[in-house]
């Protein structure tokens, strides 16, 4: 007979199981005391060992709180898995889109810098479009009735920019042969969401703004193509439509809705088979290009800091221009004229040209006592013989945009109260 502490054998386990069934019990129902009686005297300790071997180990029951915690963790892990898979799909689509855009030619077409033989009085119109700040809302009461801006007004002003540019070329500059037109888009086409007050007051979120404004931009460029036959768009990004609160150096261009707008317009014209329109979308914050013999450097202008003195924006622009010229000269890529936006004031100098704004004065400019200028953009003619010759503003505000009546009614109400 085995002692209390010897190892339980398989034969002993089978024998014990047979005796349990013979006694009318099962392994699950028999207790230690009953099993000891079945096995015989002196088998108390042995019965406990045999019983533990025969019975399957019971799963430890988790508390309701622990079960709920595990359930929540499981749901969170499943959600993270779904999000990860979804992100991978979106990333792949984005990479496919980038690859598609990268295949498009980015060189400047020959007609932009080579004069057409046999045609006298040639001149290339250059339209400078920047600082539209689409979907920003300017309340006229908050700027002492100097301006008003919203999606409806911006749509009208953008249309007016394209129409008036054509009118200037056709009716004010007669006798010039135009081989095409260059449209320089210099950033801040959207106001974006980098400031809390913009998030609170903009007409739409950034993606919603993009969905609306790509069509009016497409229509405007096509309008130019219908009149001039060929359009070349050169584009850099501004600081407002970026996706990060803090400006980025690495990857900052592609992290910007100005870049996305230009690349999507490029894709749309290419898919429509419209060979009249070509694009150069910069992957850097600056872009070098040439029209005839004039070498340009296009930038937005937010890299230049300062401007609080009596010279205002001229000081940072002159310093920035000097630094860029030194950099470009060292890189064997010099330029003659720098064009920029950002400062919302149209100024033409021999070395650089600053653009105005489609938006006009806003609450920030009014509070900061910046110099007032009517909403306007720029146009100039570049000729093969003399470079930049004729320059003109393109005034984009109509004489009556509708909101001016509110000012008159508001003033009348004040006088009536005073009376």
Image (cartoon, rainbow, N blue to C red):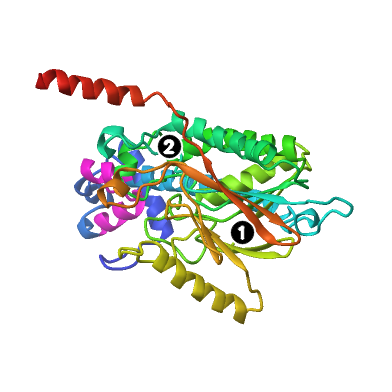
Tell whether 245 sits left or right of 258. Answer: left
The residue closer to the viewer here, 22 or 136, is 136
The residue closer to the viewer here, 44 or 337, is 337
**Mark 2 Cα-neighbour bin, 10 Å: few <14, some 14–19, many ≥20:** many
Q: CA distance from mark 2 to mark 1?
A: 24 Å
Instruction: Look at the image and give the residue range highlighted in magenta.
Output: 46-72
Residue at the image position 26 percent from the left and 54 percent from the top: 47
Residue at the image position 16 percent from the left and 23 percent from the top: 414
Q: Is residue 36 above or below residue 328?
A: above
Q: Main secondary structure of the magenta part?
A: helix
Q: In which quadrant of the rendered view does residue 304 lie?
A: bottom left
Residue 257 appears anywhere in the view: yes
SS of the residue under disc 1 = loop
Pinpoint residue 317: horizontal percent, then vertical percent.
45, 66
The residue wearing badge 1 is 282
Q: On the rendered image, what quadrant is the C terminus found in? A: top left
The residue wearing badge 2 is 135
Q: In which quadrant of the rendered view does residue 171 lie?
A: top right
Reply yes or no: does residue 69 show up in magenta: yes
Residue 27 appears anywhere in the view: no
């Amino acid at each position: 007979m085995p002692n209390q502490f010897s190892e339980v054998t398989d034969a002993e386990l089978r024998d014990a199981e047979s005796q349990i069934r013979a006694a009318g019990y099962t392994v699950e129902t028999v207790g230690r005391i009953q099993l000891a009686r079945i096995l015989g005297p002196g088998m108390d300790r042995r019965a406990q060992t045999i019983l533990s071997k025969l019975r399957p180990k019971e799963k430890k029951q988790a508390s309701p709180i622990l079960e709920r915690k595990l359930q929540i963790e499981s749901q969170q892990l499943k959600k993270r898995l779904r999000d990860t898979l979804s992100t991978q799909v979106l990333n792949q689509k984005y990479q496919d889109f980038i690859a598609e855009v990268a295949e498009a030619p980015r060189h400047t077409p020959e007609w932009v810098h080579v004069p057409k033989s046999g045609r006298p009085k040639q001149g290339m119109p250059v339209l400078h479009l920047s600082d539209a700040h689409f979907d920003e809302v300017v309340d006229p009461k908050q700027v002492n009735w100097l301006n008003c801006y919203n999606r409806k007004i911006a749509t009208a002003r953008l249309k007016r920019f394209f129409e008036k540019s054509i009118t200037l070329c056709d009716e004010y500059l007669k006798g010039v042969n135009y081989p095409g037109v260059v449209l320089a888009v210099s950033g801040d086409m959207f106001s974006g969401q980098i400031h809390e007050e913009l998030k609170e007051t903009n007409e739409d979120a950034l993606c919603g703004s993009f969905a609306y404004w790509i069509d009016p931009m497409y229509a405007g460029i096509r309008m130019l193509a219908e009149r001039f036959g060929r359009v070349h768009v050169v584009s850099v990004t501004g600081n407002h439509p970026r996706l990060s609160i803090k400006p980025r150096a690495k990857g900052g261009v592609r992290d910007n809705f100005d870049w996305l707008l230009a690349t999507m317009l490029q894709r749309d014209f290419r898919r429509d088979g419209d060979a009249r329109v070509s694009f150069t979308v910069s992957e850097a914050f600056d872009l070098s290009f040439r029209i005839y013999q004039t070498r340009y450097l296009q930038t937005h202008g937010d890299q230049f800091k300062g401007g609080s003195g009596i010279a205002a924006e001229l000081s940072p622009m002159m310093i920035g221009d000097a630094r860029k010229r030194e950099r470009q000269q060292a890189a064997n890529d010099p330029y003659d004229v720098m064009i920029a936006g950002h400062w919302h004031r149209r100024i033409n100098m021999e070395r650089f040209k600053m653009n105005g704004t489609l938006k006009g004065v806003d609450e920030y400019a009014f509070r900061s006592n910046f110099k007032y200028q009517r909403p306007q953009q720029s146009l100039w003619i570049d000729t093969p013989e003399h470079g930049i010759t004729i320059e003109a503003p393109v005034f984009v505000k109509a004489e009556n945009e509708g909101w001016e009546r509110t000012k008159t009614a508001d003033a009348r109400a004040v006088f009536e109260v005073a009376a």
